[in-house]
Amino acid sequence: MLYDWLFNLIPVAIVIALVLTVRRAARKPLWAEAIRRLKTNRAALVALAVIAIYGGIAFCDSIAWRDDHNAPSLSLIQRTFGGTQEPTYSAPMATETFGEPRPRPLAGKHWLGTDGTGQDVLFLTLRGCRTAMIIGGFTLLIATPLALIFGILAGYHGKRVDDAIQYTYTVLDSIPNILLLIALLMVLGRGLPQLCIALGITSWVSLCRLARGETLKHREREYVRAARALGISHTRIMARHIFPNLLPVVVISTTLNFSSLVLAESILSYLQLGVPPGIGSWGNMIDASRLELARQPIIWWNLTAASIALFVLVLAFNVFGDALRDAIDPRLRS
Amino acid sequence: MIGYLIRRLLYAVPILVGVSLATFMLFYCVFPPRQIARRNLSAKYPTPQQIDAWLVVHGYDKPLGAQLKKHMTELFLLQFGKSDSTGEDINARIRAGAWPSFLIAGLIFFSSLAAQVFMAIWAAYFRGTYVDTWLTLLCVVLMSITYIVFVIVGQYLLGNILHLFPLAGFESGISGFRFAALPVLLGLAAGLGSGTRLYRTFLLEEVNQDYVRTARAKGVPESRILFRHVLKNAAIPIITSTVLSIPSLILGNIVLESFFGIPGLGSYTVDAINSQDFAVVRAMVFLGTLLYIAGAILTDICYALADPRIRLE
């Protein structure tokens, strides 16, 4: 029981950390300016609200507890939308099962119908939010520190270190992403952590290259030379002087990366390399419904719900990422 | 030029060595052949004897040093050996699958380049107006739809409802084009958004240059300015960025071929995933890298051909 509650602390801690980071950043002039510009952009605010809603659903799905010792641990979403198990397909808002010679009455009401195993589609779609957020968020938690550490080290030290790091990422980058993902996932096996690790390995290279380039620029600036003349250690210069100056680039690139990670999950699910079937994900839903369009009469609600949920989240991240880029660095505005 | 090419090719060697070392580490150290045998054997709990026999049959029984030597020579001589699950010759299968894959990838590459550049010019022509705004929005929307949904919905609408294309399958020879049409169209649609958006920014960077103002002052019509002057100058960043489309072409091959039942290298890879065929995946990773590096070198050559100011030395 205690163990379950410890797990609930993780999403709470993530939310608190996010809020604290944003509030701290808002006090710095550069970020305050960016936030002020973002507030004038209506599309960005709508996109942010959409992301917040998805995040909220994911948060509710992460808070779980048991009713008694033997009961399974159920999340808030499972308790609210779990619905009743039906025998087979049923159309949205229908009162009886679908596609059977003799339709049976349904046990409950389903806004978006049920899928082949009789599960509520709305419930499955909502469960996909958590998986998508974990895939995006944890992958970036793996990839971003890796990229920053190697990128700053390569740019700052140059010479041998730079050569070694550049060689490593050039090798990784010359393997087309999807093939590397296939190889990694075949070795690691199916699972959510495995997926995050594999996506992390393939997605750190671009940010690393960016961080290296930026560090090369900053290394020659007066403030770094002054810091060096004052006798500040290399580690401190990298961590306290150069790193904060890379943050705008990092924030923009991670926001825009998020959407490509969510999209990658759906493709990997199609290749049977995504998350295991027990964990709800939009990729698995789309993959499962791919043959249902060919049925007579067709079953469309399954595919539609999953792809719209996926589309809206990715669109929101794309719009917000673009707005963020314009707000942080107006020179990049096209 | 020749000297540059030779240097470029030599530069590719350490990268290829790195890639083959990385695959070796992945498939021999992180996930040793014993595990591969366990996944491939049909018995749920194979005995050690069964595993040993499998290792001998598939040539995984030598010490690690010898394995490394075999792995490297196999890859660099492009002799990929035998498949882990079916035992058939991988090279023969690659030769058989090369044409359909090449057809699909080539058609997608050229048609989407043309479509993206055309859309980008359109957007640049109407820059600052609502046409441009809506086109940009359309690009972001297209970018947000996953490849799989494009393929599923596209096949359903164009193949199943409208009967414009054959639903799936492939034939060799000229009639292959008929079967390739729908996959190519869907591949084109899936890549349209990101490409157009990128090329639009390249074009807009050129539109504000002095030479454009001069041309306009001479009375050159706007369409001619865009298609002649601006496009020629924007060709350089466009060519440079085409190399980035190679990984997405490979992704397209994998998804489209397996979905439409085209017997190319992509569907071979998907079959290998489903049958836990590590030898084939290893070969495909190396082959994909080889194609990517070759594409990058080709891009550099095109770059020099397009821009007389650049000399490759």
Image: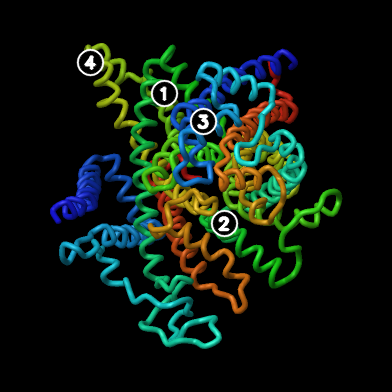
* Helix, strand or loop under label 2: helix
Q: Identify which amino acid the numbered label 2 is placed on.
A: Ile
Confirm or deny contact between disc 2 and disc 4 (CB under 8 A).
no
Q: Where residue A288 appears, x then y in whole percent?
A: 51, 63
Q: Where residue B141 appears, x then y in whole percent?
A: 53, 58
Q: Identify which amino acid the numbered label 1 is placed on.
A: Lys
Label 1 sits on residue: A217
Q: Where residue B170 appears, x then y in whole percent?
A: 77, 54
The answer, for residue B130, to whether it is visible in the render is: yes
Q: Residues within 10 Å of mark 4 (few under 14, many from 20)?
A: few
Which marked residue is nearer to the observer: mark 1 or mark 2?
A: 2
The answer, for residue B219, to whether it is visible in the render is: no
Question: Which label belongs to residue A232?
Answer: 4
User: How much space separates mark 1 and mark 3, taking CA atoms?
Assistant: 56 Å
Label 2 sits on residue: B148
User: How much space separates mark 2 and mark 4, taking CA atoms?
Assistant: 52 Å
Q: Nearer the viewer, residue A278 or A281?
A: A278
Which marked residue is nearer to the observer: mark 2 or mark 3?
A: 3
Q: Nearer the viewer, residue B147 or A105?
A: A105
* Helix, strand or loop under label 3: helix
Badge 1 and badge 3 in a common chain: no
- Mark 2 or mark 3: which comes first in sequence? 3
Label 3 sits on residue: B52
